[in-house]
Image (cartoon, grey):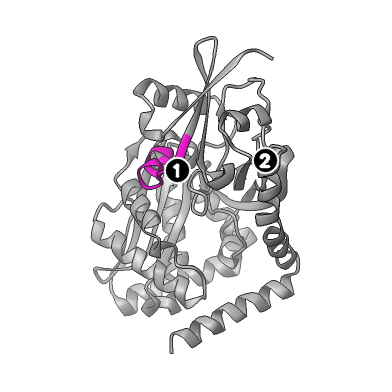
Amino acid sequence: MSDVRIRVVSPGELGAADTEAWRELRAKADAPANPFMEPEFTLAVGRVRPAARVAVLREDGEAAGFFPYEKGPLGHGRAIGLGVSDCQGAVLRPGLRLDTRHLLRACSLSAWDFDNLEADQQLFLPYAGRGFASPVIDVGGGYARYEEVLRRQSPKFFRTTAAKERKLDRQAGDVRFVFDERDPAVLRTLMAWKSAQYRRTGRKDRFAQEWISHLVRLLAETRAPGCSGVLSVLYVGGRPAAAHFGLRSRTVLSCWFPAYDPEFAKFSPGLILHLRMAEAAAAEGIGMLDLGRGAAEYKDALKTGELQVHEGAAVRPGPGAALYWLSREPSRRAHGFVRDRPRLARFASEALNRAARLRGR
């Protein structure tokens, strides 16, 4: 194995040459151009998460790779932005020979936790415990072709959604869609809707965590070819009825935070929004919308295919690894036990919803 030198820095210490090399290496990857894997996402996380770090790899004086992560107590590491990052891993030069344990040692990590590891991350795949589907919408052939696919595979869904959009326009006012809205007030509205949805369904409110709210605001202002924030809004009668905030590259729109005004729930404004997003994305030259890991009926109706992401932890043998296993593995196994049993998962979801309703009384 050739001599790979590794230097650990905070994201803010990366220079312009480093970020450009990162982009060039990422462009050579066979994987879809997911914006979460671009330097801009790591730079934004670095501004809100003091423990964010980047291992900069050099071989023969040339940039050979970048490994973003967050370092916690006892050397327990996690993917950069874990909890909200939908695509994770290292950005490495094709063919680079690297030992995972050597990388972890250089980063002073006993373990590195991930929950959305990219499918072709050969360095970490041996440590993956589970794989999950991430549904996608392929609009590379244009929206008309995607619509044809929908009419074949989900005819009732497509007819019903189209009828609801016409009814919404008749009964509630003019329906208008904006793919890339820049009004920060609408972003605040979306975040308020999403927080209410989390509480209503008994989930942890992500936007109650200041670092996540700050991160979203930072990314909403980010404009780079590989990673730009995109706020898409469905207006009805001049006011927002549904909205989505995600990240885009030149060819991929990574769907992230969708929500809608419950007042319009009977019209399914979120579904209408996603179809409008797919149409606008195709017109922008985007070939794929990544709906993200997680089962949902609307994803099943909209998707044309799936990517794979993985959950697990790369571990370096030692006391730190043992402590990591004791602190995380029982919980991970419990979650896996529930996920593997749909009926139990449904009961758990219903219990969360009941608890949320009781708290709201």
Q: Secondary structure at mark 1?
A: loop
Say which residue label 2 marks.
314
Q: What residue is rendered at 37% in x and 50% in y?
A: 215
Where in the figure is residue 346, as x and y percent of width and height? 67, 75
- Decide: is 204 above or below 294: below
Judged left or right of residue 92, residue 192 is left
Where in the figure is residue 260, as x and y percent of width and height? 39, 69
As drawn, the residue found furthest toward the bottom would be 361
Q: In which quadrant is the N terminus drawn?
A: top right
As drawn, the residue found furthest toward the front would be 319
In the rendered structure, which amino acid carries the disc numbered 1?
Answer: Ala
Say which residue label 1 marks.
51
Q: Residues within 10 Å of mark 2 (few under 14, many from 20)?
A: many
Comparing 294 with 199, the one in front is 199
Judged left or right of residue 176, residue 266 is right
Magenta part of the chain:
41-53
Is residue 198 visible to the viewer in this orientation of the structure? Answer: yes
Comparing 240 with 39, the one in front is 39
